[in-house]
Image (tube, rainbow, N blue to C red):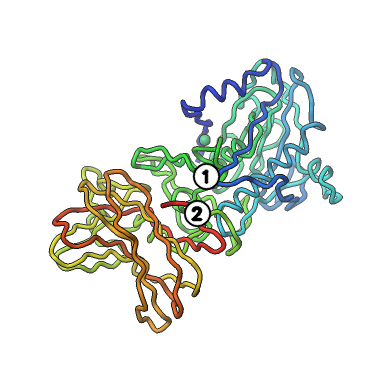
Amino acid sequence: MLRLRHLAWPAVLTAAAVMAAGAPAYAHHRGGSEPTLPYAQPATPPKRGCTTVANPTAPTGSTPAVEVIYAWHDGDGNHYEESVEQIARIVDRIDWLIDESTNYDQHLKLSCRYADNGTYADYAHALVVPEKIEAGANPYTASSTVRSDLIGTGYDDSNRYYLVFTDFESDSDAYQCPTTGGNPVTGHCSAVVELWDSGVAGHEFSHVLGAGHAWSGESGGAYYADIMYGWWDYWMADQDFNTYYDPSETTASFYIDPYPSTTTANIARHPALTTPTCCDTGFSNDLLTAQERTAEATAPGTAPTGFTFTGSGSSMAVTPACGVTGVSCTYYDGRRSIQVSVGGAAQAYLAVSRRPAVTVGLTYKFFARLRSDSAKNARLELGWYNSGGTLLSTSTSTDIALTTGWEERAFQATAPTGAATVRLRVTTPTGQGTFTYQVDSLLLNTCNPTCRPGV
Ligand SMILES: [Zn+2]
């Protein structure tokens, strides 16, 4: 697919962006500030290093990899020597933030033009290739001009994904190339970045890998806590494993844009990244399947695969469609949610059928987004089972007051002695009459050493 993605500056950021750009008109690149949430990046990111060594303009037959380019023109001059290590550090930070977002080990594959001697300076020089943009001129050079130059120079190989840092005023934008570089229209796939920090460059390069903007959906609300929307603050990618990055299930795909777009992706399977392997530490993690998180594989109005329901007089279904076939009337992400219709005297329980394995003494945190048109209460529950399949005990949250918004709720508890698996349930206290509520965006974190925030 060929789609140019501009960096969409939200209105709230306009003033800051103008200030950042308020330097002299002919200043070279604009230095950005690194995102510091959900926690500070390391002062010096781990050196990623070269994955492969190839001729930058003729890498034919090489493994798919990222080619990093420093672009300059006569108007602002060539500052390669001053910039090369700064650029390499930003690339290292992008590698760090992808790896750090989850408990999966996954990294960029970087192409270098020669095998470096082990020093950081030599690595940076091997990684970052200078390219003069002959048609570039002050005060502004469009990213299309940059790309035309690169294509004319031979930077259009299907094995390469170009990450271009412009040392002059240009654009920050990207093409989406989730499966291969060298797309059939331009022969070239790249992110062009004029604002130099890992938030902007990581955002744009994530577009190349296939990510969209993480609007939460489908519900129309903005979702700020993500590099694909809040890159000025946040470095992490898809903390819910349900929008564009799920390294735990690389065959899963997610809608990356609001309805009616049908574009799906999962950047975890991108050929310019290493294969994800579990488990290291990271900001978020998940023990559920994509279907258990999203219910996307089941048609509206039918019983959701992977879920079990108990409670005479009540029922569950993927939230029915109203007007658009295959799309639930209301949902948080993707196109579907689960609806529970509560009635009768028995307590109603919606359960994830599969019980994920747990370790005694470790803490687990169950997240779900819940909404209802009725002001009723729900609870989250963790039920602990031994290896023989006997329920040992349950840990249940206090009452959660449902609202019409898709608020994220979470409840955590520690696996007791003898526990081998955990049952996840959403329930509603009895005596509340007849009403419906919806569930979406489930997640189960392990909290040792950390689980992500959320109440
Ligand atoms: Zn963007």
- Which amino acid, mark 1? Gly
Quarter location, residue 313: bottom left
Residue 452, label in figure? 2
Residue 141 x/y as whole percent: 64, 21
Residue closer to the observer: 284 or 181: 284
Residue hosting label 1: 210
Quarter location, residue 390: bottom left
* Residue in the image at 37% along x and 55% along y: 368
As drawn, 64 above or below 163: below
Graded by Cα atoms within 10 Å as few (under 14), some (14 to 19) or many (20 or more), the crowding at tag 2 reads some
Graded by Cα atoms within 10 Å as few (under 14), some (14 to 19) or many (20 or more), the crowding at tag 1 reads many
- Residue 306 in sight here: no
* Residue in the image at 50% along x and 41% along y: 1
* Residue in the image at 77% along x and 33% along y: 83
Q: How far separated are the C-alphas under marks 1 and 2?
A: 24 Å
Quarter location, residue 349: bottom left
> In this rendering, would 399 be left or right of 78?
left
Mark 2 residue element: loop
> In this rendering, would 105 be left or right of 334?
right
> In this rendering, would 144 be left or right of 401?
right
As drawn, 326 above or below 182: below
Mark 1 residue element: loop
- Which amino acid, mark 2? Arg
As drawn, 169 above or below 70: above
